[in-house]
Amino acid sequence: MKRKITLKQIARELDVSISTVSKALKNSKEISADTIQKVQAFAKLYNYRPNNIALSLKNRKTNTIGIIIPEIVHHFFSKVIRGVELVANKRGYNVIIGLSNESFSKEVINMEMLANGSIDGFILSMSKETLLQQDYHHYNETMNQGMPIVMFDRVVSDIKCDKVIVDDFNGAKNAVQKLISNQCNHIALITTKDYVSVGRLRTQGYLEALEENKITPQAELILKMDDTLDYEVHLEALEAEIEQLFKAHKNIDGVFAVNELYALSAMKVARRLGLNVPDDIQVIGFTDGVLSKHSTPSLTTVSQHAQLMGERAADLLIDKIETDFDTEEEQFQTVVINTELVERESTK
Amino acid sequence: MKRKITLKQIARELDVSISTVSKALKNSKEISADTIQKVQAFAKLYNYRPNNIALSLKNRKTNTIGIIIPEIVHHFFSKVIRGVELVANKRGYNVIIGLSNESFSKEVINMEMLANGSIDGFILSMSKETLLQQDYHHYNETMNQGMPIVMFDRVVSDIKCDKVIVDDFNGAKNAVQKLISNQCNHIALITTKDYVSVGRLRTQGYLEALEENKITPQAELILKMDDTLDYEVHLEALEAEIEQLFKAHKNIDGVFAVNELYALSAMKVARRLGLNVPDDIQVIGFTDGVLSKHSTPSLTTVSQHAQLMGERAADLLIDKIETDFDTEEEQFQTVVINTELVERESTK
DNA sequence: TTGTACGCGTTATCAG
DNA sequence: CTGATAACGCGTACAA
């Protein structure tokens, strides 16, 4: 087992100074062709590579970006990561991940660990708990130390930083418009409680579409689920509620759900009640997941372009990292990613 | 914007030496209570945190582990990551990810980037291309430099390192045994080409179960798909093949598929041909995915316990990292994770 | 053409 | 009780 070789070892071996080795490896013209040749041959033989940590310390730059997400076993977030990784690698950066597991304290701890020199900047999506507590001091402290942050998807306007978000409002509005154009008159909404901004915006989009079409929204057609509960429990409760809803309002002919599982639950309940999708009820979900594509019938969805969000976030962050702010005033931008309605079998 | 504070700045500010500050922060009894108090107060005020990079350089230890996987938008791999992250964080390590995207060269490049000081060890699963080319020099070189590697899932015996694998053979055997116990006599196998070891082992398990039950395997009931193709194309071809298979062998009453999508495709084709699952055909898949749980009918699967694999891999790696090998001889172990048959609606 | 000295931030050792 | 020094590995301005 041969340890990684360093400049110092090469220097000792070849009986030259460390800096000569360093320069020779960079083909500096200060060094004689002879020495260069000798050093490079030796370096290649022993497979010399500069130590990243030493470079990071010296340059005060790690070429690593940190990404903190609430959950990784989730198609949306893993697609975002892929986008980040793609761009980061292309631009010479590594990606280090931290999971908050939807917990405020884990988010803080993770950020503190990474902020102490390990990375050059953050890409993150807020945990539900943080969203609930509305305590954003850790973001501001991090940014005050000169560490840039780009937030995506779950965002609040109180925090001044670059952001990448989905056009939740118009995505929802277009989806509901689609249902209306498809002759749906009684469209139910299955959403989450309002504290997650994306849920709120999608609800607004739903309402707006109805109003534009002179349809009076009915509160009874709106189901607001508490998604802080365990998923299994939550889904069972959801199905029961949907069943009740469908039974109480037999004229429901369309459903817009703010995520994939809600939409699937709606289809499941519909089937159980002997209703055909899309003939009796048309369903649209909001997601980037796999379930939609492979469900029966396959689900029409509003695609969020998660990977693109990751790519844009990474580009924004790296741009910021590599910009020198002594010259110009710092400016934050919010990139809005347009959604796309992917039509499948659950709509006509 | 106040930059992160360092020992040097505290020292200058308080007019003491750097080493005094360092010691005071560690409550060294060499330092007077007075000074300790003063230094710690100042440090707290300015929220001093030691710089990880400097510590890494000094200690020659990064407290970071690298994980390299072929793909992250994949439930199995993201669950593994979650397991790794869980254990790593608990034991004081960060996780840095690299995606090989199933490509040999990206795997090599990623490993080289991380191996130059950024991490203390690797957890990885081989890319398909590496498996095909059977070129393992980068693994061996990395280990020769004293950087430990733990491989999981996709593994080859030629490489001497710690491994975490699923008991593919028995998982498959038990699944097929289940079908046989459920009165299936003509069981089809949908698998991948043999170069991925897990596919091979699952095929062997299938054959073994048949033989133990005195059922003669029929080559015509075995579909070997080439999964190096693009998924969409591949799945369409697969469905066509399955349809042909079902039509040619109307007596097929069971299907064992080595992954989730293959199993779902089988169910889809069955439905299209007017066959009922599980009444006419029972189906079992091999996976940890979400599709199984939410498909209709939901799919009976062999669970791989992906998260547990990640946890075990992380523990193995960190144990190795933290063991001093001057004392004892290095030993490699292979942890085998038992599978579990999760029974759902696609079997009786 | 080559080598010395310094600094990145930290800690350990040793001297005062 | 406090401070100077060296070391981790590298790159570079400056000196020889």
Image (cartoon, coloured by chain):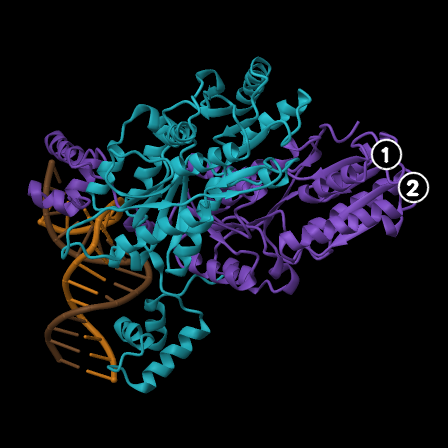
Chain colours: A purple, B cyan, C brown, D orange
Residue located 15% across and 55% down the image = B328
The quadrant of the picture occupied by the C terminus of chain B is top right
Tags 1 and 2 touching, CB below 8 Å: yes
Residue at point 92% right, 41% down?
A: A215
**From the viewer's perspective, is A19 left or right of A279?**
left
Question: Is residue B178 visible in the rendered structure shown here?
Answer: yes
Q: Is residue A282 left or right of residue B102?
A: right
Residue occupying the far front of the picture: B214
Determine the image quadrant of residue C6. Answer: bottom left
Q: Which of A135 and A106 is in front in this view?
A: A106
- Tell me, for residue B296, which label it has, or none: none
The vertical placement of B130 against B338, above or below, is above
- In this view of the protein, can residue A92 be seen by the observer? no
Chain of the residue displaying label 1: A
Q: Which residue is drawn at 64% across and 65% down?
A: A133
In the image, residue A178 sits, relative to residue B163, either above or below, namely: above
- Labels 1 and 2 within one chain: yes
A148 vs A273, nearest the viewer: A273
* Chain identity of mark 2: A
Whole-percent x and y of residue B292? Answer: 58, 38
- Residue located beneath label 2 in the image: A215
Q: Residue at x 29, y 55 (%)?
A: B319
The quadrant where residue B276 appears: top right
Amino acid type, callout 2 = Ile
CA separation in Å, label 1 and label 2: 10 Å
Q: In this figure, which residue is indicated by the disc labeled 1?
A: A180
Query: Is tag 1's residue or tag 2's residue first in the polypeptide sequence?
Result: 1
Dot 2: few (<14), some (14–19), or many (≥20) neighbours within 10 Å? some
- Amino acid, disc 1: Ile
- Whether residue A300 sits left or right of residue A25 in the image: it is right
Q: Is mark 1 on a helix, strand or loop?
A: helix
